[in-house]
Amino acid sequence: MVIKHKWIFKTESAWSDANEKMLCLDTGGWRTERPVLDQTKCNYCGICAMYCPPQCMLDKGDHYEANLAFCKGCGICVHECPRKALTMKPEGDFTHEG
Amino acid sequence: MKANKGKISVMMGNVVAANVARLCRPEVVACYPITPQSEVAETMSGFVADGSLDAEIVEVEGENSAMNVVVAASMAGARVFTATSSYGLVYMYDAVLQASGYRAPVVMINVNRETPGIHAVSSGQQDMISTRDAGWVQIIVENNQEIADQLIMCYRLAEDYDIQLPVMLNYDGYYLSYLNEETEIPEQSDVDAFLSVLKTQPQRPRIIPGKSTGCGTHGIEMGYVEARYKHCAALERTKKKVDDIDKEFANYFGRSYGGQIEEYCMKDAEFAILTSGSAAGTAKTVIDAKRAQGIKVGLVKLRLFRPFPEERLLQAFKGMKAIGVIDRSVNFGWKYGPIATELKVLQGALGNVPILSYVDGLANLDITIPHIGRVVDEVGAAAKGKPYQDVTWIPME
């Protein structure tokens, strides 16, 4: 058998560096709704980032934003936001973004 | 360099296993007691209590936790030991799969016993068969000395950098677990010396606190395919490694078991019997008696069940006119026993020779000398071109 596959893991088993390979699946494609921020209500407390299960909230300096490549749209950030700055919006509203 | 003569004691199989496991210096031990394995768990705990083993015993509430504990400890870099049987083995099944998927070199004793469904507190290899496809290395031994020697070889095999696979060492419950037999227990310094080769190999990957390493969370597309491919390739490499380690063991300790298979009176044999475990001991007695009558029969004892020793078996059975296989378990969905079914995969390469399947020894029914004598007679007749029965459940006739 001639192997054309380019090896992904350096080791015998699927051991890897979490920073490189663990988020290799584009889970964003699973989403039906996404969190949308009203920046006027946000005080940059970071609770959304703390509760985010896949830890995909990006620190933007004065607010947090979900990395939509990995955000599965679970809505936990919306539920936990003490200032109700986040709301879930259907993906259908964003189809023009591709 | 040769090992010193070890101390010879008369002990039961389970106590032999625990004594030798101690000499292999496991750092984490988690065993949940279950008949017919309990003395292994009890004796290991006793060694830690009296200070003769410096290991962490994790007291668990069941076998599933036992396997999860040793898998995690193994992934953190520890040498680990566990032991189970039957219900315990199937209760830990998901963790058994994880051990091999993570390529954690866990060494586990499995004392063969019938599986749940029909509650049988009795011997049989059905438990081992039920984990056949778990990706472990599975080895079957015949007597107490072989338990001792193979257990040491299991650590060499599992932790070898080229292998990195969990190894299950199987021996017959009741027949060996409670059999008191003369056994030479090697000296600590000799076991240390034999295992020291592992220290010269590169460090296998392990979980390190503070480092963002991960394992087992990559079941995605080509990551999954690659991990599976490497796992299967490692199992293939295991076959030669088993032979090599056996030779090295023979050079150092002076005892050899043939590696993947043991061939007994096979050199000039015209037909052969294939079996495993303690039944192979009885079979040798029968072979000797038949040989004394001038019947050219040989025996192959299957030691390595997973990976299946395809090449060694083909070599051993080359030119045989008939082969009889005695299984101590059933193969649901096939009429032949499990080992007989697997041998039939090699039928093409073996040529059109009769392969006779025998099921015997279920639920503590003895595989007796007359039973094996009958098998030899029938396989001998098949070798001469006489008609034969494909499958025979010996106790049912």
Image (spheres, coloured by chain):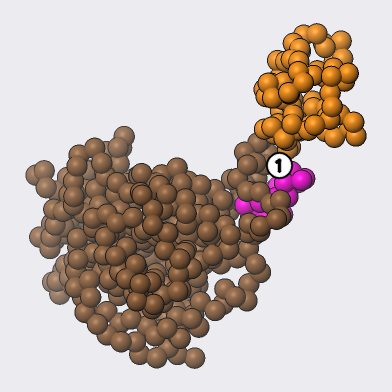
In this view, the residue in front, B325 or B279, is B279
Q: Quadrant of the C terminus of chain B?
A: top left
**Colour of chain A as rendered:** orange
In the displayed structure image, the side of residue A21 where residue B129 appears, left or right: left
- A37 above or below B381? above
Total number of numbered discs in the rendering: 1
Q: Residues within 10 Å of mark 1 (few under 14, many from 20)?
A: some
Residue underneath mark 1:
A22
Residue at 88% over, 18% down: A40
SS label for mark 1:
loop
Residue at 22% over, 43% down: B391
Measuring from the top left, give residue B225's x and y in whole percent.
63, 41
In this view, the residue in front, B281 or B224, is B224
Is residue B240 something one can see in this rendering?
no
Query: Which amino acid type is shown beneath numbered disc 1?
Result: Met
What is the magenta segment's predominant secondary structure?
Answer: loop
Corner quadrant of residue B42: bottom left
Residue at 66% over, 59% down: B208
- B23 above or below A52? below
Q: Is residue B36 magenta?
A: no
Region of the chain picked out in magenta, as a range: A2-22
Is residue B38 something one can see in this rendering?
yes
**Colour of chain B as rendered:** brown
Corner quadrant of residue B51: bottom left
In this view, the residue in front, B116 or B42, is B42
Measuring from the top left, give residue B194's x and y in whole percent.
49, 80
In the displayed structure image, the side of residue B248 where residue B173 appears, left or right: left
